[in-house]
Image: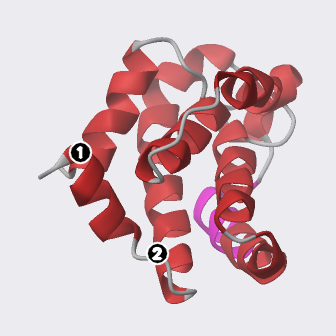
Amino acid sequence: MEADIRRLHELRQQGKGCAQIMMQLALEMKGEENESMIRVMSGLCNGMNCGLMCGAFSGAACMMSYFDSAAAVDMIPELAEWFEDTYGSMNCGAILDDDMGNRVLKCPKLMEQTYREAKEILEEYGFDLTAMAEARWGE
């Protein structure tokens, strides 16, 4: 398992939400800390805490904006198309079959896949996140 994916799961076990984890990974890769930002990202978790837009998606979109807000205008629609094709919806409730208890079964894999896709898109735009992750967490 890649070091950044291990870190993703560590953050889950610490009780961080999906959107918070995406931003925490971005901050850590850049060697930065911002507890206020991580706290604010909790508003996007669990489909904005009401089953709407998936927090893993919205967190990944914020991660892209964090790396390059100008390019994010192009990157986020690419991620959105992939996400909807992969999961059939961007709505947290629909993905979880309107049962938030399904988070334990569905969200870990969804978070991994969404993070990997966002990372791949960012790398297409010139950010070597693989090298950043290896430098930060090692392999």
Instruction: Say if residue 98 shows up in the picture.
Output: no
* Main secondary structure found in the magenta portion: helix
Looking at the image, is mark 1 or mark 2 earlier in the sequence? Answer: 2
Residue 16 shown left or right of residue 78 in the figure: left
Q: Is 82 covered by the magenta stretch?
A: yes
Where 77 falls versus 101 (above or below)?
A: below
**Dot 2: element:** helix
Stretch of the chain drawn in magenta = 81-89
Where 71 falls versus 18 (above or below)?
A: below
Q: Which residue in the structure is indicated by mark 1?
A: 137
**Dot 1: element:** helix
Residue at point 67% right, 18% down?
Answer: 100
Q: Which quarter of the picture shows residue 28?
A: top left
Instruction: Say if residue 91 shows up in the picture.
Output: yes
Q: Position of residue 71 (x, y in %)?
A: 75, 81
Residue at point 43% right, 12% down?
Answer: 14
How crowded is the residue under tag 2: few (<14 C-alpha within 10 Å), some, or many (20+)?
some
Residue at point 62% right, 56% down?
Answer: 87
Residue at point 67% right, 63% down?
Answer: 64
Where 16 falls versus 93 (above or below)?
A: above
Q: Which residue in the structure is indicated by mark 2?
A: 120
Distance from disc 1 to disc 2, alpha carbons, whole Å, reads 18 Å
Q: Are marks 1 and 2 in contact (CB under 8 Å)?
A: no
Dot 2 amino acid type: Glu
Q: Is 27 covered by the magenta stretch?
A: no
